[in-house]
Amino acid sequence: MHRFSSLVAVMAFLLILTGTLASGSGGSTMMLQWTGHLAGSGAISDPPAKYSHVYQLVAVSVLVLTILMAFWLWISDSRRYIKTLAGITVGVLLVLAVGLLIPGLSVFSLGYDLGIQAFFGLTVCLALFTRTDWRWDHPKTPDVASPSVRQILVFMTGALFLQSLLGEGFHRGNLGIAPHLVLGIVVTLCAVWVLEMALNKFAHSRPFKMSAILLAELVGLELFLGIISYSMGLDAGVASAPQPGLLVMQVTHAAVGALVLATSLFTTFQAFKYLAPAESVISLVNQQRNPELDQQQE
């Protein structure tokens, strides 16, 4: 089940990449026609955009694999929260599929982007939680920072979801670059802060430290690729000939962004596995040292 869930997560990753390819090569017009055809508003008259058929093939494959994965998890002896998470994942994907039948909506709208990002995050969670060695009852280290590392990582993961939407809004001309850039700087500062804490205060927790290092490296790479992509976009705006390298850079930036989101989720879960609020850890230690405390309270 872990391998099958990982396959679904990889396919969701490919769905994001092929969607970027299709939208960057004129796929928005094609998909508007396709959704209109599905809704019965007319037939497709123009030739399909480049990469659009690849996107449709990946989308159908993801839908089938996700339903099979959820069914397998429900009939298995997996933990209840995993089954619930699988049901939510299928629900999100079905909402996106049904949304294609509504006239006037496109798979390249911001609402669809939000759904795809949420679906990808859910598949990453399922791929992690179905590991045979995944458990939450590891010995905890007090998280004495203020704000805590866990709080920073939760904020950072949420900011990454929002940042991807702001980036899509910029590429489609709905928003300026400033919100996406400012939030990217905030995410970078959070990643550096988490890295500093992991190296100095939680160096003994090797799994958490390695995930924090990987997260900081990917965030730095994404920021670098974002600057290059923006610069190439400015050059393409004044160039007389098409710039095919711009699409390659946009897809690369989207790929690294998806990897950053997945790594942020993984690092957040690692923090919840190995770290705990200082008050709860101290309370647990005191109860273990004073076994008669509960009896006295009763």
Image (spheres, helix red, strand yellow):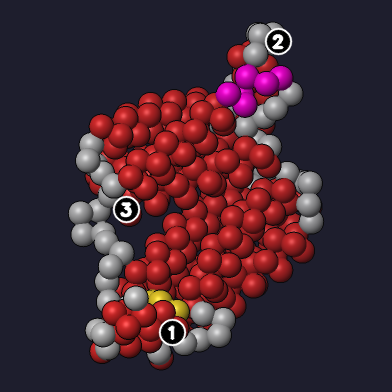
* Residue interval drawn in magenta: 98-103
Where residue 107 appears, as percent x and y from the top left, is 62, 32
45 shown above or below 262: above
Q: Quadrant of residue 215?
A: bottom left
- Asked if residue 102 lies in the magenta stretch, the reply is yes
**Magenta stretch: dominant SS?**
loop
Q: Quadrant of residue 135?
A: bottom left
Question: Of marks 2 and 1, which one's residue comes earlier in the chain?
Answer: 2
At a point 45% along the width and 47% down the height, the residue shown is 122
130 shown above or below 134: above
* Quadrant in which the C terminus appears: bottom left
Residue that mark 3 sits on: 129
* Quadrant in which the N terminus appears: top left
Where residue 35 appears, as percent x and y from the top left, is 63, 20
**Residue nearer the viewer, 107 or 114:** 114
What SS does tag 2 mark?
A: loop
What SS does tag 1 mark?
A: helix
Q: Amino acid at mark 2?
A: Ser
Which label belongs to residue 41?
A: 2
Where residue 79 appears, as percent x and y from the top left, is 29, 47
> Is residue 264 in sight in this rendering?
yes
